[in-house]
Image (tube, rainbow, N blue to C red):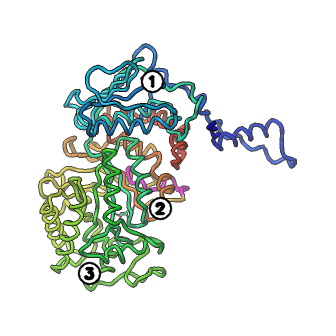
């Protein structure tokens, strides 16, 4: 008999309430204020009308229908196209998601044509104008039809289905009896993203995160329809990816981290695992090797890469001379006028491109204090040519707008107006303004984790902005999308990362996905409140922002 574990908090609130009534406990402690009674999963209001949805990101259009909901039962089957392929993989992924909490079998069958009643049917097709991630979801009492031009659209539609079921669907074990039945309200959703690039960045250089922790980061991106994982793989404190032609980059450059901990690095097999896990969720990996600054770990491994510039004050707990475990920025740089520097960049980009199926390689370019404007531009232009020669498009932080950008190169906006230099060259922009999207910013002065150099960023600040009107003079066509960077100077494990990510990540996911006409703060703050039980069941840490009535 599987026992349903009552969440501790419920127990606590029940006990608190009990004590308040029976004054249990000898010494009359001051009356504890009872915790806000959480709505127990058993009585979570089932979704009555599709329009009452608490979906995040909000879909482009939702139409409720009269009539009974679709119920998941022992005979519910999942039907995927006979051709198999990625659409079948999405069907299998959905079955794996639905089985544990419901205890139902969800057999998956591959067949075209009319499906049996009571089936969840995945089909390729629909309006190609909805793009690679658009989908349409039609729910009646006897069928659920999910149609998308591409498998990615099917996967995004499955996340919507997931959110239309009670939060208990996220539970790991069959919670028989909770809820009485698993229903999805009738209606129709036609949906597609506003922006093509919707990402989040994990800085694995300041603090190293294991492959399993990166999976947990990717799981949150998948739940909220983000499609890009930017990994900040190198910086002053750490080099995190194995490069065969320069082996000490990982073995020495990866041997420590901020604060002097053991650091770590991804072997090529580890990196391939991360790429596969992301690809299974239709998420593209964008690796970043930050040059010419933020390069102390590489220079500590290969001192010939640096000019004879002063190294930082030795870090008390750095295991090797030259390694740095503090958090100052901008002081290091590769030697721009040595040929070995460009051989280094070429070797690294060659090996990184070979292990990265996605179209982009991010080459950083931020916070360069030791080169003149001309030296910087010449360096960036040369690096850009190297990336192109290896068949990839370069992304760089906004400062690269000071160089001559190749068509296809993307500038990532973070803190100033240099993005306008890139826009004037016709470059596409990825918007990640530090005052809105930097998830390492404290929520408030009271937040223990995070930094505050840009701003304190509460949930509403992350939600209430528009990537196009954020900067005057930009047009919809200039903006490729948005990204939420999580820098990890103060974050050393995934639980701390989740506290800073959640709930701002879903807010930014909605900024990237939902048309402006379907977006507003009052609606979002109400909808996101319903996601907390889901996060608790998933074991995801989060900041209970006082801006939301959780
Ligand atoms: N700026 C630096 C990051 C990191 C960040 C912390 C960019 C592009 C401050 N560069 O953001 O390396 O230190 O908030």
Q: CA distance from mark 1 to mark 3?
A: 66 Å
On the image, numbered disc 3 is attached to which residue? 306
For image coordinates 74% across by 41% down, the residue present is 16
Mark 2 Cα shell of 10 Å, populated few (<14), some (14-19), many (≥20): many
SS of the residue under disc 1: loop
Residue 359 at x, y percent in the picture: 20, 53
Q: Tell me which label, 1 or 3, sits earlier in the chain.
A: 1
On the image, numbered disc 2 is attached to which residue? 491
Q: Tell me which label, 3 or 2, sits earlier in the chain.
A: 3
- Would you say the beta carbon of the disc 3 residue lies within 8 angstroms of ligand 1? no
Which label belongs to residue 75?
Answer: 1
Q: Which residues are magenta?
A: 436-447
Q: Per the image, is 534 magenta?
A: no
Q: Are marks 2 and 1 in contact (CB under 8 Å)?
A: no
**Residue 516 appears in which quarter of the rendering?**
top left
Q: CA distance from mark 2 to mark 1?
A: 46 Å
């Amino acid at each position: 008999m599987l026992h349903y574990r009552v969440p501790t908090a419920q127990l606590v609130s029940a006990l608190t309430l009990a004590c308040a009534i029976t004054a249990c406990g000898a010494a009359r402690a001051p009356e504890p204020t009872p915790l806000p009674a959480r709505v127990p999963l058993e009585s979570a209001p089932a979704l009555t009308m599709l329009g009452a949805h608490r979906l995040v990101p909000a879909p482009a259009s939702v139409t409720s229908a009269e009539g009974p909901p679709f119920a998941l039962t022992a005979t519910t089957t999942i039907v995927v196209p006979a051709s198999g392929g990625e659409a079948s993989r999405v069907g299998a992924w959905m079955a794996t998601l639905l089985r544990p909490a419901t205890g139902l079998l969800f057999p998956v069958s591959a067949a075209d044509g009319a499906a049996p009643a009571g089936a969840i049917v995945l089909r390729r097709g629909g309006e190609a104008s909805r793009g690679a991630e658009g989908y349409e979801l039609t729910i009646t009492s006897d069928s659920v039809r999910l149609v998308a031009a591409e498998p990615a659209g099917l996967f995004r539609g499955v996340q919507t289905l997931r959110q239309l079921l009670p939060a208990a669907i996220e539970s790991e074990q069959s919670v028989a009896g909770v809820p009485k039945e698993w229903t999805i309200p009738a209606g129709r959703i036609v949906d597609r993203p506003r922006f093509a690039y919707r990402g989040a960045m994990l800085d694995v250089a300041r603090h190293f995160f294991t492959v399993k922790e990166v999976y947990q980061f990717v799981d949150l991106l998948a739940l909220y329809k983000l499609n890009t994982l930017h990994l900040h793989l190198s910086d002053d404190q750490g080099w995190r990816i194995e490069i065969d032609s320069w082996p000490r980059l990982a073995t020495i450059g990866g041997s420590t981290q901020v604060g002097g901990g053991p650091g770590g690095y991804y072997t090529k097999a580890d990196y391939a695992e991360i790429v596969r896990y992301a690809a299974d969720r239709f998420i593209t990996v964008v690796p970043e090797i930050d040059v010419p600054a933020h390069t102390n770990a590489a220079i500590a491994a290969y001192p010939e890469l640096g000019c004879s510039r002063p190294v930082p004050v030795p870090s008390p707990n750095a295991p090797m001379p030259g390694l740095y475990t503090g958090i100052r920025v901008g002081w290091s740089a590769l030697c721009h006028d040595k040929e070995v520097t460009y051989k280094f960049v070429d070797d690294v980009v060659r090996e990184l491109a070979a292990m990265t199926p996605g179209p982009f390689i991010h080459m950083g370019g931020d916070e360069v204090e030791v080169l003149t404007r001309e030296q910087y531009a010449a360096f960036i232009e040369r690096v850009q040519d190297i990336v192109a020669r290896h068949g990839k498009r370069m992304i760089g932080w906004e400062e690269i707008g000071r160089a001559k950008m190749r068509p296809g190169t993307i500038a990532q906006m973070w803190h100033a107006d240099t993005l306008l230099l890139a826009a004037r060259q016709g470059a596409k922009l990825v918007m990640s303004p530090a005052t809105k999207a930097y998830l390492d910013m404290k929520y408030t002065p009271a937040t223990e984790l995070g930094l505050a150099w840009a701003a304190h960023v509460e949930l509403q600040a992350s939600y209430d902005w528009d990537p196009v009107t954020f900067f005057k003079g930009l047009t919809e066509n200039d903006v490729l999308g948005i990204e939420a960077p999580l820098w990890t100077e103060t974050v050393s494990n995934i639980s701390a990362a989740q506290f800073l990510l959640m709930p701002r990540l879903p807010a930014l996911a909605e900024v990237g996905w939902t048309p402006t006409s379907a977006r507003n703060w009052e609606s979002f703050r109400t909808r996101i409140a319903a996601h907390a039980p889901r996060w608790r069941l998933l074991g995801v840490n989060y900041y209970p922002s006082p801006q939301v009535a959780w």
